[in-house]
Amino acid sequence: MNNIINDTLHKIYNVLNGRGIRISGHRHGIQQMQAEDAAAIVPNDSNEFDPTSAFYVGADGNITVQTASGSVVTFVGVLGGSIIPLRIVKVFATNTTATDIIALY
């Protein structure tokens, strides 16, 4: 069972690393993601920004985003303090109730 878990963690590590997300390893699996910069995001239905490595949601709510590959998705019931490891280029004002959103680069 441990081999399956380790193989899966290595696959996740390789995918995230290939997308620019830096991860420090630990002998028991993936330990943490590390960003190099951050910027506040003001939800807007038309403006795009540089693709993030991940984003932080400071206060509970829903958040509608456009991914770096162009998909639009709504995360429902995101808890404040969550870090979502997804590359996004837009946070829509429409249908976004979460606040204090920060881009991690």
Image (spheres, grey):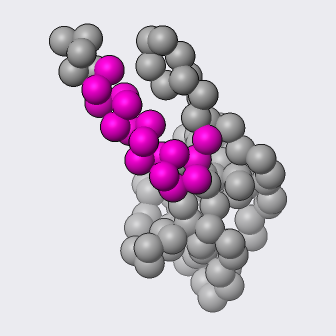
The x, y position of residue 77, in whole percent, is 47, 48
Q: Is residue 28 above or below residue 49?
A: above
**Residue found farthest to the bottom:** 46
Q: Residue at the spot x=45%, y=12% of the render?
A: 28
Q: Which residues are magenta?
A: 6-22
Q: Residue at the spot x=77%, y=47% of the render?
A: 36
Is residue 19 located in the magenta-colored stretch of the structure? yes
Figure quadrant of the C terminus: bottom right
The x, y position of residue 47, in whole percent, is 68, 85
The x, y position of residue 44, in whole percent, is 67, 79
How many marks overall?
0
Of residues 36 and 57, the one nearer the viewer is 36
Is residue 2 located in the magenta-colored stretch of the structure? no
Asked whether residue 78 appears in the rendered view, the answer is no
Q: Is residue 4 above or below residue 13?
A: above
Q: Is residue 12 left or right of residue 32?
A: left
Q: Is residue 32 above or below residue 51?
A: above
Q: Toward which corner of the image does residue 94 lie, by quadrant? A: bottom right
Of residues 80 and 86, the one nearer the viewer is 86
Of residues 15 and 87, the one nearer the viewer is 15
Asked whether residue 24 appears in the rendered view, the answer is yes
Q: Residue at the spot x=48%, y=46% of the render?
A: 16
Q: Is residue 84 left or right of residue 13?
A: right
The x, y position of residue 35, in whole percent, is 71, 44
Of residues 102 and 96, the one nearer the viewer is 102
Q: Residue at the spot x=79%, y=60% of the render?
A: 40
Figure quadrant of the N terminus: top left
Q: What predominant SS class does the magenta segment belong to?
A: helix
